[in-house]
Image (cartoon, rainbow, N blue to C red):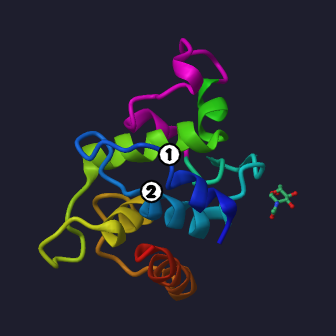
Amino acid sequence: MSILCVVYRNVPSNSQSQPLSQVCLGCICEVSSGCNTTIGCSGAVCGPFGITWEYWTDAGKPTLNNEQLSDNAYPKCVNDPYCAAAAVQNYMNKFGRDCTGNGVVDCEDYLRIHRLGANGCNGALNSKYENRFKLCLRTFQNQ
Ligand SMILES: *[C@@H]1O[C@H](CO)[C@@H](O)[C@H](O)[C@H]1NC(C)=O
């Protein structure tokens, strides 16, 4: 678990527009990259959450410090831990749903949508990935 998960916990959240708790955000970051904020881009994904251009676009193209859109707005945003987190919040506002059928939209649903997309989110997760996520949630949920 990285420091960043702890950092996210101090960001004020508004449950209307920011459906993910700070712990949930931190754990998705953790399983996506070890929450490595200097991981950069590789192939089609960038930043600690492993966000693609399409995902960022669906999230409404948030920009770092609300700058105007520019050619490098996508990597600048998603390589920044807070702008990337805002993209995840926006994305889940739009696509959040109960993938597991347990009657609530919870962090596991958000992880599944992040990883598998909203349509395929009831599919199988890589078990190593899933176990790491559940351990993260268990560790930080009750603090
Ligand atoms: C983060 O990713 C970069 C680029 O892949 C790598 O060089 C660095 O060692 C990673 N940092 C950690 C803490 O894993």
As shown in the figure, which amino acid type bears the numbered disc 1?
Answer: Ala
Q: Is residue 63 above or below residue 69?
A: below
Q: Which residues are magenta?
A: 52-72
Which quadrant would the C terminus be assigned to in this image? bottom left
**What kind of element bears circle 2?**
helix
Disc number for residue 38:
none
The picture quadrant where one finds residue 12 is top left
**What kind of element bears circle 1?**
helix
| Residue furthest to the front | 143
Asked if the stretch drawn in magenta spans residue 55, the answer is yes
Q: CA distance from mark 1 to mark 2?
A: 9 Å
Which quadrant would the N terminus be assigned to in this image? bottom right
The residue carrying mark 1 is 85
The residue carrying mark 2 is 22
Residue at 67% from the left image edge and 23% from the top image edge: 72
Residue at 26% from the left image edge and 43% from the top image edge: 94
Q: Inspect this view and state whether residue 125 appears.
A: yes
The percent coordinates of residue 25 (x first, y second) are 47, 58
Residue at 37% from the left image edge and 44% from the top image edge: 13
The percent coordinates of residue 45 (x first, y second) are 63, 49
Number of numbered discs: 2
As shown in the figure, which amino acid type bears the numbered disc 2?
Answer: Gln
Q: Is residue 38 left or right of residue 78?
A: right
**1 vs 2, front mark:** 2
